[in-house]
Structure formats: structure tokens, C-alpha cells
Amino acid sequence: MTTTESSGSGDVSRSMELLWGTGERATRGPKPGLTLDRIVTAAIELADAEGLAAVSMRRLSTELGAGTMSLYRHVPGRAELVDLMLDRVQGEGAHAPEPATAEPHTADSDTAEPHPGWRKTVEKAARDELALYQAHPWLLSVNQTRPVLGPGAVGGMESMLAGIKDTGLSDPELISVIIMVSGYVSGVARTQVHAVEVQQVTGISDDEFWRAQEPMLSTVMTSGRYPLMAALSPDAFGPDFDHFEFGLQRLLDGLEVLVEQRTKR
């Protein structure tokens, strides 16, 4: 999938005002009932159905039954709209943690696990992010190396940090954990989304694709030139193995070694 958009490519100050609710409200002319929330919702629904390229101010005005200029009274342009769309979907399921409640000190509390939730926190974050890409494949077509941080993105990071802050890692390392997990998930998601796209574009199923290669591969594998490949079990490339979960657990295993080293100091 080719990158076609970049977050933060519009008026960043205006995007921040709109994301955090400090922008000036429209004072003249908008269609009754037309709101920024409706515009962003419609844009996300359109992108989910047809891809991000389908989202334009003109198309949205048609979908919403409003004049194009009415949309511009709420959002400056498409670039800023993409910022709002990103933050909205990134905020799905992301909630700031509840304030900690003080508990009475007990003898057992001295021997309690110092950071009992970090692994489950990372697991959940990874699975939630994968589900987000599956629900909104167009996210993969946005360059997010310079994110515009709205409440959705910041809330998600706050929740993540609340679950991993007691690992003994430094602040830069905590951020690196978030980057590492996100990079792993986006890579898996890209493969999954591409697999769906290629079937839609070509009309050829995975089974049909691999059956077309089978005659030649059977000859090649019995030639003796590739003994290790030829010796692989029939299920080596089977659909039943969960590569995402296997990789996630190995990533967490490696992180656990570091956490144990830090907390034993």
C-alpha cells in the first residue's frame, strides 16, 4: 500500500484547536445540524468503505447533504480533517486510567508483585491496535511519523504508560516499548490488509494462487537443490498457526528479561 497522506500536513495549530475543542465555533451559515463531529464521523465511514482516497470535501458534502462551503466553516480542509479522523479512531477504546485509590497497608502488600499488569497491558494494547487496523485499513496509508497529538492519541498513551510505568525502565525506554509494539503490530496488520486487498483486486483466492504454483514447485522441491525447504512439514505454511500471537509473545518474553533485570537492582 502506497503512502498517500501525511498526518500534520495541514495547519497544525488549527488541527490542535479543533482536536482539543479550543477552536472558534462557526457563527454564520452552516446547515442546521451539521457539526464537526458529524463531518468526522462521515469521513471515517467513507474511508472505511472506500479507502482514504475517496474522502474529499466535495464528496462529504454530498454524503451529508450540505454545501461544500458549509464544511469549510467547521474544518479548514482535507489535511486537517485527516488529523481529526486519525485521532478519533486512535481514541477508540482508549481511556485515561482511573485515579489510584489508596488501600490500607498490609503485610502482604510488601511481597506483592511490583508491577503485576505490564505484560497484560502490552498484550491488550497490541491486540487492540491490530483490531483498529482491521476495522480501519486506511490507517496504513497515512504517514504518522509526525503525529498531531489530540485527546485520542494522548489518552491511549496515558493508559499504556499507566500499565508499564512500574517496570523499572527509563522514560525513553517506556516510549520505545510503545514504538516497538506499534511497529510490530503495524507490520502484521499491513500483511493482513494486503492479503485481503489482493484477493479483492485480482479475484483470485489464496488457494487458487498457490495451486497455480504447485506443479512447478513440486518439481523444484524434488530436485535436491533446496533440501531444507523440501523437508518442511505440510503445515509449515498452514493457516492454523497464529503468527501474530507467536511473535507478540516472543517480543514480550524478551521485554520480560529486561524488566526482571531492572527490578532486581
Image (cartoon, rainbow, N blue to C red):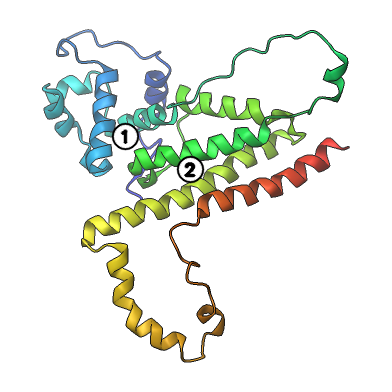
The percent coordinates of residue 82 (x first, y second) are 33, 33
Which one is nearer the viewer's eye here, 243 or 180? 243
Q: Is residue 129 visible?
A: yes
What crowding class fits label 2: few (fewer than 14 Cα within 10 Å), some (14-19), or many (20 or more)? few
Q: Which residue is mark 1?
A: 79
Image marks 1 and 2: residues in contact by CB distance under 8 Å: no
Residue at disc 1, secondary structure:
helix
The percent coordinates of residue 72 (x first, y second) are 22, 23
Is 209 on the left-hand or right-hand side of 98? left
> Where is the C terminus found, in terms of image quarters?
top right
Q: Residue at x 76, y 46 (%)?
A: 257
Q: How far separated are the C-alphas under marks 1 and 2? A: 15 Å
The percent coordinates of residue 231 (x first, y second) are 54, 79
What crowding class fits label 1: few (fewer than 14 Cα within 10 Å), some (14-19), or many (20 or more)? many
Is 4 on the left-hand or right-hand side of 16? left
Is 163 on the left-hand or right-hand side of 107? left
Relative height, residue 128 to residue 67 (above, below): below
Which one is nearer the viewer's eye here, 18 or 244? 244
Q: Which residue is mark 2?
A: 145
Label 2 amino acid?
Thr
Q: Residue at x 17, y 13 (%)?
A: 30
The percent coordinates of residue 194 (x first, y second) are 35, 55
Relative height, residue 222 to residue 213 (above, below): below
Label 1 amino acid?
Ala
Q: Which mark is residue 164?
A: none
Q: Is residue 2 visible?
A: no
Label 1 or label 2, whichever comes before in sequence order:
1
Q: Residue at x 39, y 14 (%)?
A: 21
Residue at disc 2, secondary structure:
loop
